[in-house]
Amino acid sequence: MAMISSVQNPLIKQIRKLHRTRERQEQNLSLIEGTHLLETALAVNCSPETVCYTEKWRQRQGQLAEKLQNQAKRVEIVSPEVLASLATTVNPDGVIATISRTHLHPIPQNPLQLGLVLERLQDPGNLGTIIRTAVATEVQGIWLSLDSVEIDNPKVIRSSAGEWFRSPLVVESDLSALVKKYQAQGVKAIATLPTATKNHWEIDFTRPTLILLGNEGAGLSPQLATLADETVKIPLFGGVESLNVAIATAVILYEARRQLSYSRVD
């Protein structure tokens, strides 16, 4: 296999375009970077379209490289300089790949015990961290508003540490209708608001629950907040005004998981 050593190679130029949202949409491809993400993709039967790796990476990861030769539609060896031009990280580990944007995330479970509704999230690192935490706490559905960060932003995928592939993640055009639908099924909606009087541990999470979280700066929209059956806050001390939305999500989800774990024992 000949090595691609020019950043002007047509394939390389085409893949590099995937750094941009519009190009990912037009090419119907997502970009994944790194050995761990590739291993996770293969573990959930998500076969890459194109894989590019360096010779040094192939020597280190011979077994994985062989598996990719069998499962990817196209595999190319590239120079370290070309690999660096394809990556969105400062120190890539030697491999990148493209996957179809039609990769199917697990379908949210029904009936629902614990779900997340995320409105207008903008930071890809926050979304990726929330996805990782949600999978770790057995959240059964994550719904993201259309005006949030794109779900296959490379930083979202990286920040999820591979759990992006396992997350029951849906982009939803009408979050209000979604919340009402689940409320009609007996699921309560809990909004996170700084003006709430209840602390997060005072909510009964043993009942089927949707947790509503909003934009990093503005929080939940009034339209969505007014639908909540209850509102909740995380108490803050030391003059701290707010928590990062990913941290706040983790605090609430682990309280929910604690309650659910004890209820199973009982």
Image (spheres, grey):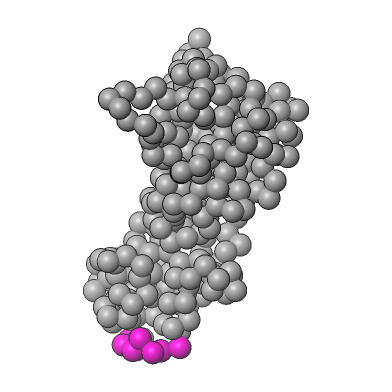
- Is 260 or 17 nearer to us in this picture? 17
5 within the magenta span = yes
**How far across and how far down the image is residue 14, in percent?**
48, 81
The answer, for residue 109, to whether it is visible in the render is: no
- Is 76 or 211 nearer to us in this picture? 211
**How far across and how far down the image is residue 77, in percent?**
34, 80
The answer, for residue 190, to whether it is visible in the render is: yes
Q: The N terminus lies in which quarter of the figure?
A: bottom left
Name the residue at 36% across, 67% down.
Answer: 88
Name the residue at 46% across, 48% down.
Answer: 127
| Residue 81 placement, left or right of 251 | left
Name the residue at 57% across, 29% down.
Answer: 191
Outermost residue to the top? 266
- Is 249 or 216 nearer to us in this picture? 216
Q: Is residue 258 above or below residue 81?
A: above
Q: Is residue 82 above or below residue 117?
A: below
| Residue 67 placement, left or right of 188 | left
Q: Main secondary structure of the magenta part?
A: loop
Name the residue at 50% across, 25% down.
Answer: 195
Disc tally is 0
> Splitting the image into 4 quarters, where does residue 158 fall?
bottom left
Q: Specify the segment rendered in magenta.
A: 2-10
227 within the magenta span = no
**How far across and how far down the image is residue 206, in percent?**
56, 18
